[in-house]
Amino acid sequence: MKIAIIKYNAGNIMSVDYALQRLGIEAEVTSDKEKIFAADKVIFPGVGEASTTMAFLKKHGLNTLIRSLRQPVLGICLGMQLMCKHSTENDVDCIGIFDEEVVLFQPIKGQENITKVPHMGWNDITHVKSPLFDESIEGQYMYFVHSYYATLGADTIATSNYILPFSAAMHKDNFYATQFHPEKSGPVGARILKNFVEKC
């Protein structure tokens, strides 16, 4: 099985590759369009800022390529946000696979000390569904680092709650995505990556 990890101007790409290696799964980190298009599975990770990243993807035609993929695709963190229709992070239109808006967390007035932005650390996920998960993942804790979140909608397949409920994971057609970092979420996160490779 050929697995491609999309290489672009965002961080966290190699940590996903290392997580797969720990599972005995080989992947290729590449920006080569032919290799990405020919892969059996594609992973689109990322940590960074939405508008500059979208500008890079458009410049290199990767936004169009990602939309055209028909094999299973997994977006992670910024990758998930860029797969939504729009981000308020510098007001940028994104790839538009998921029909959701990405917006900035707003600390609760008077509770700023416990509702800090970014949301960073471990939080549970609930209402899980999709081949990406199994029943034992309901209520498990995942590792999050983000200031912006995707709203809840028809494509939401897992929910988390920080300040307000938001999409912890999404799924539409052949596209899957997580706001949390499965590669940093211990054995449960590793199981999600394995589920993507073996079941999706």
Image: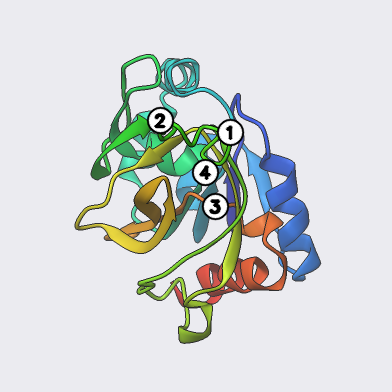
- Camera-near label (2 vs 1) is 2
- Camera-near label (1 vs 4) is 4
Q: Residue 198's spot in the image, x, y percent?
A: 54, 76
**Viewer-side residue, 193 vs 135:** 135
**Viewer-side residue, 23 vs 84:** 84
| Image marks 4 and 3: residues in contact by CB distance under 8 Å | yes
Residue beneath disc 1: 31
- Camera-near label (3 vs 1) is 3
Residue beneath disc 4: 77
Is 45 situated above or below 48? below
Is 81 situated above or below 58? below
Residue beneath disc 3: 180
Name the residue: 60% across, 46% down: 5
Report crowding for label 1: few under 14, some 14 to 19, many 20 or more residues within 10 A (C-alpha). some
Report crowding for label 3: few under 14, some 14 to 19, many 20 or more residues within 10 A (C-alpha). many
Quadrant of image for the C terminus: bottom left
| Image marks 2 and 1: residues in contact by CB distance under 8 Å | no
Q: Earlier in the sequence, mark 2 or mark 1?
A: 1
Give the SS element for disc 4.
loop
Name the residue: 35% across, 42% down: 150
Report crowding for label 4: few under 14, some 14 to 19, many 20 or more residues within 10 A (C-alpha). many
- Give the CA separation, mark 2 to mark 4: 26 Å
Give the SS element for disc 2.
loop
- Give the CA separation, mark 3 to mark 1: 23 Å
**Viewer-side residue, 171 vs 70:** 171
Residue beneath disc 2: 109
- Give the CA separation, mark 4 to mark 3: 6 Å
Residue 1 visible (yes or no): no
**Which three-letter amino acid code belongs to the residue tagged 2?**
Lys
